[in-house]
Amino acid sequence: MSNEDTPKVILSTYPTNLMINQPATIRYQTLRKLVTGFEKVGAVASSEKLTEAVFRVLISNEADKTYKDALIQIVPKLVKVLMKGPDADEKTKSRCIQCFIQPLSDFLVGTESSALIKSSAARALIAAYSYLDDDTFKYFLVPVVRGSFTEEDYQETTVVDVVLGIMPRLVESDYGWIARGIEIFYGNETYSYRKEALRMICYLASNKFNKEAMQKYIMKIYLKIPHDKAWIIRREFVRSMEYVIDKIFDEDVDSVYNQYIELTHDEQKQVVAGCIEILPTIIRNERIQYKMKELNFIDTFRKLTTFNDNVDVCLIKIIPYLIKLYPEEEEYFLNLMEKSCDSIEEIMRNTVNIIFKQVFDLAHNKNILLNIFEKLANDQSAGIKSEMRRYICDVLSLDTGRFSDLFRSLVEESNFRVKVSIAQHLPVLRTMSFYDDVLVKLTMSGFFGVREVALKEIENCLKENESKRSILFNQFLTYQKGNCHQRQALAYAFVAVSKGNEEYTTKATPNLILMLDDPISNVRISTLIALGKLHSSSQDVKFALSTLLKNEHDTDVHNIAEQIYARIC
């Protein structure tokens, strides 16, 4: 066979070459070209002998599993040709159902089918269903799947995959048999079937059903699951709350919460661990928070903190919520956080780091929080240390003496996130003695994002305190011989400290003119932009610009100079 077989060759040789009595090399070579062959000869021509040959292999008891599995994997593409091809008609669609869809459906529930074939058939049906027209889907595939899913004698866990796979095209009238199938699955003695029922419920809650549908079709079954004799199912119930809790009515949330509390006392540690694990998810639900407050969840929380002799990281995660629910227990929660800072587990210390800002804004007892900050701001983990230091300004205002040295060192460090955080908190530092020095250093930062925030702070600061203008201006002058980043920043600093004030605009202009001779082109560009922002049209500026235009060899600088000259002159 060549790579460019003609329709005549395809129709005359492929059917024979697919037969199981042919050498494996011939069969697999043909299999690799089968989809292209179907597409080349079209739906009508391929629906006869070619489709018949595929069908015979599919139903053969003598074909080896590997070969049959390989054929099943390409069947969806053959379905596409017969159902959606340019020349597809009712006859080709009928042949598609008879030779492809029917055998795949039989594989799902056939007792002689291997697990491999059942799994492949399920995937093939899922891949093929979108190619079926509405009538074929509604009046053939759905009844087949429904029968497989709701008849106890035929139920297989692979059918669940098919039901979930075709779910996007199922409609409300199908909800009844879906619920019936779930109920039958959950009634099975084999726990793996019951687990599949729960998987279906999670999918429906997160993708398909609204609250009304959940209450009508699912909740009766769902509320049985916490009492399942298999601890694995009880644990999976707890995990399923992530998907279900926001898709049910308040009265059902109450029932689920009560079941959850019972499971926190479960004899199996894995179930209790699941209850702890799900807490950060379910506590976001407002009705759950209401029930926690109403039924005094704090007692359960205290019990869970002693589970396995360790405080689980998930319990630390929910502390911000619990402080809101139980403000009178604030010190207890803060002590838990501080104790967790001493954990050898980095994930535990990092969790405290993550919730620190939320708790800091909520709590009244700041002393314990200052201890927490001090520990984690000096943590052995560079990541935790860096993240915690972003909150330096929050703690600095509470205890300047304790944290001033750390603050000054952070201003000097090249950590963008910490520096930008400090810049954003500059307004709360205005009354502190080192404010001017910090503002100037951040304005001269090598990070554009930091400079941008600091420049805005200069403008806001001067609106409140005009006397700062001369102090800042004089400090900026000391950077005229700084590095190239500082000289670039200096140009914009002159604008921020001078704009709107004629006296300081006059002072800044000569300094900017001098900077037009800077050897670094980026500095000259920043200087030109600064002159444009000051709108200075003095003779000195005009002369400096005209001189620059005559002598400048850098194209970018020259283009910007032309724009500024046109605007000013």
Image (cartoon, helix red, strand yellow):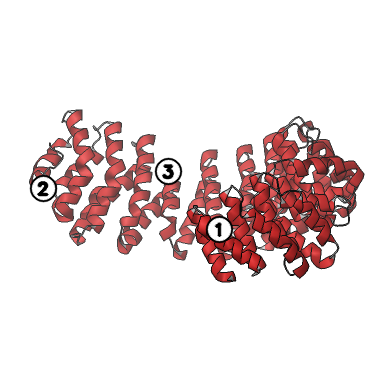
* Residue on which disc 1 sits: 548
What amino acid is found at the position of numbered circle 1 in the picture? Leu
Circles 3 and 1: CB atoms closer than 8 Å = no
The span from disc 3 to disc 1 (Cα, nearest Å) is: 78 Å
Pick the front one: 477 or 158: 477
Q: Position of residue 438 (x, y in %)?
A: 80, 50
The quadrant in which residue 459 appears is: bottom right
Q: Image check: 523 left or right of 313?
A: left
Above or below, comparing residue 184 to residue 501 in the picture: above
* Residue on which disc 3 sits: 158
Question: Dot 1: what SS?
Answer: helix
* Residue on which disc 2 sits: 7
Nearer-N-terminus badge (3/1) = 3
Residue visible at 68% across and 45% down in the picture = 416
The span from disc 2 to disc 3 (Cα, nearest Å) is: 37 Å
Circles 2 and 1: CB atoms closer than 8 Å = no
Badge 3 local density, few (<14 within 10 Å), some, or many (20+)?
Answer: many
Residue visible at 75% across and 56% down in the picture = 289
Residue 247 seen anywhere in this rendered image of the structure:
no
Q: Where is residue 354 in the image (x, y as percent from the top left)?
A: 73, 45
Above or below, comparing residue 193 to residue 88 in the picture: above
Residue visible at 16% across and 53% down in the picture = 42
